Image (cartoon, coloured by chain):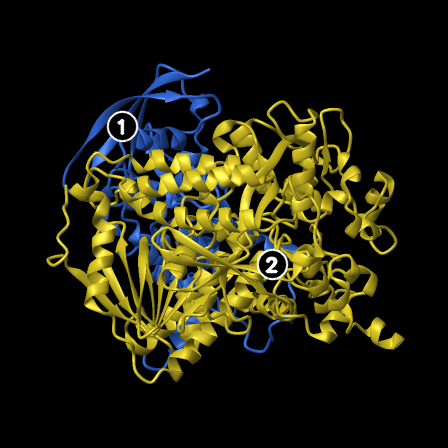
Amino acid sequence: MTTVSDSTEAIEKHEFDVVVIGAGGAGLRAAIEARSQGKRTAIISKSLFGKAHTVMAEGGCAASMGNVNSNDNWMVHYRDTMRGGKFLNNWRMAELHAKEAPDRVWELETYGALFDRTPDGKISQRNFGGHTYPRLAHVGDRTGLELIRTLQQKIVSLQQEDFKETGDYEANIRVFHETTITELFKADGKIAGCIGYYRNTGGFVQFDAPAIVLATGGIGKSYSVTSNSWEYTGDGHALALRAGATLINMEFLQFHPTGMVWPPSVKGILVTESVRGDGGILKNSEGKRFMFDYIPDVFKDQYATTPEEGDRWYTDADNNRRPPELLPRDEVARAINSEVKAGRGSPHGGVFLDIASRLKPEEIQKRLPSMYHQFKELADVDITKEPMEVGPTCHYVMGGVEVDPDTGMSIVPGLFAAGECSGGMHGSNRLGGNSLSDLLVFGRRCGKSAAEYVDATASRPVVAQADVDAAVERALLPFSSATEGGENPFQVQLELQKTMHELVGIIRKADEMEMALKALQDIATRTRTVSVTGQRRFNPSWHLALDLRNMLLVSLCVGKAALERQESRGGHTRDDYPVMDSDWRHILLVLSALGEDNIELVRKEQVPMRPELLDLFELDELKKYYTGEEIGGHRAGEAMK
Amino acid sequence: MSYDAHFRVWRGDSEKGELVDYPVEVNEGEVVLDIIHRLQQTEANDLAVRWNCKAGKCGSCSMEINGKPRLACMTRMSTFTETEVITVTPLRTFPVIRDLVTDVSFNYTKAREIPSFAPPPDVKPGDYRMAQVDVERSQEFRKCIECYLCQNVCHVVRDHEENKEAYAGPRYLMRIAELDMHPLDVADRQVAAQEEHGLGMCNITKCCTEVCPEHIKITDNALIPMKERVVDRKYDPLVWLGNKIFKRPGA
């Protein structure tokens, strides 16, 4: 057993211009950009390179290329995104995202991506929840794999260029596999570097760099039922907090409406929204297509009210309204939850998702090959013959690091965040397909601004040795005698997941969340004293002991923000405040860390939308979300003056 | 519905190791990875294993289960009898780091040796036009989740360390085929496949195809067509004669 030996601990050191923490879509796109701007860039990958959670994205990447319906453009995409987020989105991010997504997708083709095609040879686009037109570039139902492989291969090609010039593949861009960062360092208030450990050896590695891009993904592992992998422990969220940055929108969690519910070992694994986009319908145990009962007022004009109209939409979208199975994810998840609660669920506590009666078997296998494979191999269900059983699963966190929309920089100079670990873009609810495009748009923006930031930095901040020693000591705490007799980290993790799942889940109540916050205080004490056995080489219990610290901190943020927001909106549903309240729309809940596990929350006013963007909406629609005085500047109001 | 299974798991590092017996609970619907996780949570907290998606999409949890290269997340316990001893060992072709985790850097080294996609210089982003039927051939190979089971099972390198230098392995020979069949790739890849990446060492025993969890027909659709293209190029008498007569400068 290794003991604490801070002064004798050998630490490998590296110097880079930009360090990107996270090797999913956002991280890789940021690294490509930083390297293209001439910066020496490190990519820190918690798993092996190419295994990041982006591979799990199935449906596609939203971009208004207009290849399938030429009426699509960035303004329609912008409107859909704002509606999906219930107008709480950072409108500037939503604007940049809608405008830049097509270029980011086309760029992937120059890296070698092979999307499915339209009959005239362009990138094909598919329908998805909340998107007015077919908008998602896709490859069957394995779009995330195509995206990550394409970016991975682009990085290899940049390394090959460097090899030709310098004889060293890693001259300008180096990937650190299976490396976890545990702490960021600052000097004079600015980012100076970070430290972490190699999983393989258990040895520490320090990076000195003036700019760091966080691209660590989400926090789903804090919940019992999730579509997320072990990596999703809120590392970037927690690193940012501990470095003095702020988080916003942490009360908004997306429970994807369709996760597998049976057998227990696969509970939570994602069933792509493409099943519904391609015609799949939801039914309860009485065989009723129930989504028609759950169309909320704000969406009444855009969704079909009869199955006949909904079915006509698939072939004639211009003259019919879309079926309610394609409402934004928060609406569908709540509807499924209500059906199950009312006793109309499937045998294993979900509802039925039926594609078998809607498409021919060959068509299902062609359009949804990995869903066919997944159900066949893991659940013995042939989706071309029987319906699937599905239910909500914790899928995505809308909340994240508060950043400047144009540059992606947090309030800490030199610290950037992109992708799921940044906050604002998706407001209170993300539309399916907007995640892959978000990664590309803001990954590139962060890489570019990090490079510009480095250029503008006169002298490199120097990491203080005392900070390094403290970080090493904290990381080795689970091995030390101070934690002797402490619990096994796996047990504490289960408790944390259960607490969040049961008390701060899909439907929330004040008293339950108060209980959760109390339970988290107790879990905090236990997290500090978890004890691990064995050595430091690839020891999963040590890795989890350190991840737990992050999971706890972000869980506190979720609990605290969820208790504060007294309304229901998007990915935040309060049983005791069931209605959306315009007075809350413009309020952001900003979280910062006061200590290891102490969170402060302040309210902040959202910046009002630019008038010409506000004018993209009809006044009647805005009235459903905004208070009267907020929309005084709308073109309709101005015209009346 | 639950019962106690007899698991025998390889524990150790690059220097030494042994098979350790564990009695462990199994419930309905579980896969081998669930059982490994149960061991981790209970009596073997430090048991090293790689995994990510647990849905057969990332290719992380490759190991050998009763001697067969498999993804642990896609190997259902119901495929074994309740009394069967289930032996789990690390991939044999790659050096062990610890327990079920191996050093797969061989694959990343090979990946870097394959020249990347060469885009057509005169086509702007957004102007790429390709027919579905033409992209489908390469798309099959792009389903690859890089689990390295094919690299592990291929007998050219499985028990022949000395071949690793010259042989890219099925996954990366398939990558060459993928790029060669890409409708818009402009690089010439066929001769290099043979001379630099060891295509000729593959003698099409189809072991790679057999273990592929994505059911990609690696041998039939990638390696054999690639071999045929190479033969057409390399052994075409006219091409051979041309090469002799019009010697490249410096050759």
Of B138 and B55, nearer the camera is B55
Give the residue displayed 63% in from the left and 44% down from the top: A573
Look at label 2 and name its amino acid: His
What hue represents chain B?
blue
Residue at x-position 63% and y-position 30%: A350
Look at the picture and state if A360 lies above or below A403.
Answer: above
What residue sits right under mark 1 in the picture?
Answer: B43
Q: Does residue A22 appear anywhere in the picture?
A: no
Query: Which chain is mark 1 on?
Result: B
Q: Quadrant of residue A595?
A: bottom left
Chain A: what color? yellow
Amino acid type assigned to the residue bearing label 1 in the image: Glu
What distance separates the C-alpha of mark 2 from that of mark 1?
42 Å
Return the residue nearer the eye: B184 or A293: A293
> How far across and down, in percent of the image, does residue A446 sit?
47, 70
**Residue occupying the point 65% across, 71% down:** A99
Q: What residue would you read off at disc 2?
A: A426
Residue A162: percent from the left, percent from the top? 35, 74
Q: Which quarter of the figure has residue A609?
A: bottom right
User: Could you say where residue A245 lies in the image, as x and y percent from the top left?
Assistant: 42, 64
Q: Is residue B244 left or right of residue A395?
A: left
For residue A398, side relative to residue A99 (left or right): left
Q: Quadrant of the N terminus of chain A?
A: top left
User: Vertical placement of A216 versus A511: above or below?
Assistant: below
Mark 2–mark 1 CB contact (< 8 Å)? no
What is the quadrant of the C terminus of chain A in the image? bottom right
